[in-house]
Image (cartoon, helix red, strand yellow):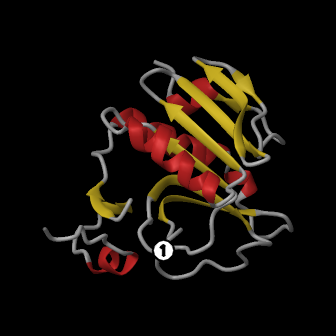
Amino acid sequence: MEALQLKTVQDLLLSSDERVELIGGEIVRRPMTRARHARAQSQVNRHLGTFDDGARPGGWWILTEISVAYEAHECPCHDIAGWRRERLPRLPDGPIGLPPDWVCEIVSPGHEKKDTRSIPLLLRRHRVPYYWVIWPEDRALIAYALDEGEWRVVATLEDADRARVPPFDAIELDLGAVIGDD
């Protein structure tokens, strides 16, 4: 019997397919982007744009579709992730090797397990302080903060709720605008 050969970040970099990520040592295709997913992703990015300002101290890098190399066998492509600029002064070429300060995943139908089980465990292991999960079809957002090594819910929004959601609680987030009011 042959042992399972886990793929590495180097294997991922050699892949000719751009729509893949490395999860648990397996190179997997990312789901097809649906309209509600794309809308939520672009709107979160737009709403948080004021934080992504390199001209002032304490700013963020907020990036979409970004690959983060956490471990040799873990390099997911996050829908949106952010780094405080004091931790990441310059953007590197290729996957980022520094865990983000915040991750937002937008759940795609059929891929819920990755966004609600695998990714939160990986982020917790690497002490990522904040994690948001958005379900566009269900019109919901749950925001978590890492508290003594465990995830704690810090905000739950539904439909057109508005709230100040850490770590971006300097502004009020309008979920209706983010997920696209019909």
In this rendered view, identify the residue nearer to me: 47 or 125.
125
Work out which quarter of the rendered image holds the N terminus and state it.
bottom left
The relative height of residue 173 versus residue 53 in the rendered view (above or below) is above
User: In x, y percent, where is residue 52?
Assistant: 70, 60
Q: Residue at x 54, y 55 (%)?
A: 122
Q: Quadrant of residue 97?
A: bottom right
Q: Quadrant of the C terminus?
A: top left
Image coordinates for residue 120, horizontal then vertical, percent: 56, 46
Which three-letter amino acid code belongs to the residue tagged 1? Pro
User: Where does residue 17 sit, x and y in percent of width and height?
Assistant: 23, 68
Q: Is residue 34 rendered to the left or right of residue 179?
A: left
Furthest residue toward left: 1
In front: 124, or 171?
124
Residue 10 in percent (x, y) is at 36, 81
87 relative to 165, above or below: below
Disc 1 packing (10 Å; few <14; some 14–19; many ≥20): some
Query: Between 161 and 25, which is closer to the camera in this rendering?
Result: 25
Name the outermost residue toward the front: 1
> Secondary structure under badge 1?
loop
- Work out whether 54 lies above or below 180: below
Q: How many marks?
A: 1
Q: Residue at x 32, y 44 (%)?
A: 33
- Is the residue 123 above or below the residue 109 in the image? below
For mark 1, what is the residue? 95
- Left or right: 48, with 37 as reference point: right
